[in-house]
């Protein structure tokens, strides 16, 4: 299954290269959602909440969830926030950095979360930069690989969102071997993200039993006018 991504910043839909450089900005999240009407589920990430900004996009997220099944992440740092996202209509909650400590898995937080939110509604984001789990907006890396982390996290969630950061946003393709290594590490559902560009890659991921969360690649098809004459950084 293809899952389009709606990333929110300052009340607008954005696409970033490597999580930093803004490449695309659209003012109306509901209009963007309408462009994805053919897809059964949407991934919504509140980037402002993820970066700890005082202003977040909770109202927009709630509106999107009222219109379409959404998995929602960004700034889920407390049990109360996870519960609020579920009350606002999220089909699933994506927990990222809070699932980890500086040295490994944040088991205390995950146990508390599991006691308050049904396991089937919980996804954990396990993102990789230079072979290590990356957290806090991909600014910090841990002494743990994604393949090592997945089995440790299995008891606390119903699936994973795994992003190959090294290729994210560049439209150069992803690392299928990395995703194969993740498939060998867990039997739980995995949604793959990060640089997925071609139909062949999507098919290969489907054969691994993985969904594909698409950002830049799907925006290129839906909003081709923004890509005319130039493409994201390919360095």
Image (spheres, helix red, strand yellow):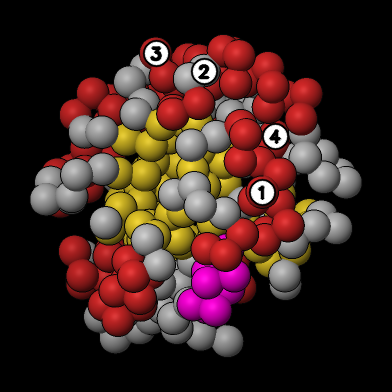
Location of mark 3 (residue): 87
Q: Earlier in the sequence, mark 1 or mark 4?
A: 4
Q: CA distance from mark 2 to mark 3?
A: 11 Å
Q: Residues within 10 Å of mark 3 (few under 14, many from 20)?
A: few
Provide residue 134's location: percent of width, then percent of height.
71, 56
In the rendered image, which residue does mark 4 sit on?
98
Question: What is the C-alpha distance between the residues marked 4 and 3?
Answer: 20 Å
- Image quadrant holding the N terminus, namely bottom left
Mark 3 lies on a secondary structure that is helix
- Give the alpha-carbon distance from disc 1 to disc 4, as whole Å: 17 Å
Q: Are marks 2 and 3 in contact (CB under 8 Å)?
A: no
Question: Which tag, 4 or 3, sits closer to the chain's start?
Answer: 3
Work out which residue is located at the far left of the displayed protein and give it. 38
| 48 or 135, nearer to the observer | 135
Range of the magenta residues? 175-182
Disc 2: which residue: 117
Q: Residues within 10 Å of mark 1 (few under 14, many from 20)?
A: some
The secondary structure that dominates the magenta segment is: helix
Q: From mark 2 to mark 4, how far is it between C-alphas?
A: 15 Å
Q: Is residue 209 magenta?
A: no
Name the residue rendered at 48%, 15% in the picture: 84
Residue 229 in the figure: left or right of residue 15 = left
Q: Is residue 90 visible?
A: yes
4 and 3 marks in contact (CB < 8 Å)? no
Which is more toward the observer, 117 or 66? 117
Which is more N-terminal, label 1 or label 2? 2
Structural distance between the alpha carbons of marks 1 and 3: 29 Å
Q: Position of residue 68 (x, y in %)?
A: 21, 33
**Residue placed at 30% from the left, 81% from the top?**
200
Mark whose residue sits in front, 2 or 4 = 2
Q: Position of residue 64 (x, y in %)?
A: 27, 31
């Amino acid at each position: 299954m293809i899952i389009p991504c709606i990333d929110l910043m300052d009340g607008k839909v954005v696409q970033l290269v490597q999580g930093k450089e803004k490449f695309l900005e659209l003012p109306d999240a509901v209009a963007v959602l309408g462009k994805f009407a053919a897809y059964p589920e949407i991934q919504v990430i509140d980037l402002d909440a993820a970066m700890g900004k005082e202003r977040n996009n909770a109202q927009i997220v709630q509106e999107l969830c009222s219109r379409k099944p959404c998995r929602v992440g960004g700034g889920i740092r407390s049990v109360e926030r996870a519960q609020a996202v579920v009350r606002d209509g999220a089909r699933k909650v994506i927990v990222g950095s809070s699932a980890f400590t500086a040295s490994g898995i944040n088991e205390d937080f995950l146990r508390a979360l599991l006691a308050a939110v049904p396991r089937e509604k919980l996804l954990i984001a396990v993102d990789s930069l230079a072979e290590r789990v990356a957290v806090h907006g991909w600014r910090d890396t841990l002494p743990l690989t994604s393949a090592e982390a997945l089995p440790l996290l299995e008891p606390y969630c119903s699936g994973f969102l795994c992003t190959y950061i090294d290729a994210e946003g560049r439209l150069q393709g992803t690392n299928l071997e990395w995703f194969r290594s993740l498939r060998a590490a867990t039997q739980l559902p995995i949604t793959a993200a990060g640089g997925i560009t071609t139909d062949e890659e999507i098919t290969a991921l489907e054969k691994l039993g993985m969904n594909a969360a698409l950002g830049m690649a799907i925006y290129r098809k839906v909003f081709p006018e923004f890509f005319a004459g130039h493409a994201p950084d390919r360095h």
